[in-house]
Image (tube, grey):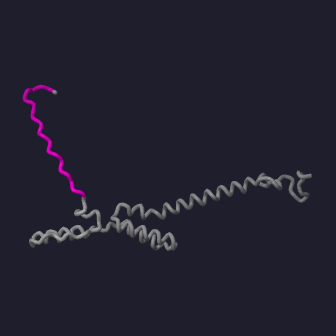
Amino acid sequence: MADATHPAAIEHLPPFVTAPGQTDYLMVGVIIFLIAFVLILGNLYFQLHAVPERMAHRTSKVQMEIVAVLALISLFTHNHLFWIAGLLLAFVHIPDFSTPLYSIADSLAKLSGRPPVDTEIEDPSHPKHEEPRVKPEPQPEARPDTHGGGI
């Protein structure tokens, strides 16, 4: 009597209709599909959201940090204007104004006869903070072969 169908049911049931107490494979498949779809869609969203930060890695440290903060603000506030501002800022190359100004100040200090002022600069790309370069040892000049011999 457990296999008997209800008298109001049609004769041929579709395969996704299960008997009472049996596993509903269609529901299990849909749940797995939805979980995978949500994870893939979330991953794509975060990858797209990180585009300005990846582009800003080629720029200066300050510019990269500003772009990262704008991306985080847009992520948490869902205000896309911050993301667009970060994207535009990542595209723009901001020139380095401090290095020529420090060079001019050092040159003027040398011309006036005063010792240059040693100012602390936080920018590690500034020339004063570069590691000293070691000159390569001069190589002895090779003498021309006067004997006419080969190797």
Q: Is residue 81 magenta?
A: no
- Please determine whether, in this image, residue 119 is positioned above or below residue 144: below
Query: Is 97 on the left or on the right of 32, as rendered?
Result: left
Q: Position of residue 138 (x, y in %)?
A: 14, 45
Q: Give the main secondary structure, helix, strand or loop, of the magenta stretch.
A: loop
Horizontal side of residue 125 vs 151, given as left or right = right
Q: Quadrant of the C terminus?
A: top left
Residue 16 picture quarter? bottom right
Viewer-side residue, 12 vs 125: 125
Residue 144 covered by magenta stretch: yes
Magenta residues? 131-150
Question: x, y (%) of residue 136?
Answer: 18, 47
Residue at left offset 73%, top offset 53%: 25
Left or right: residue 108 versus residue 49 is left
Q: Residue drawn at (38%, 61%), measured in percent from left and top?
A: 57
Q: Residue at x 22, y 70 (%)?
A: 119
Q: Is residue 92 above or below residue 136?
A: below
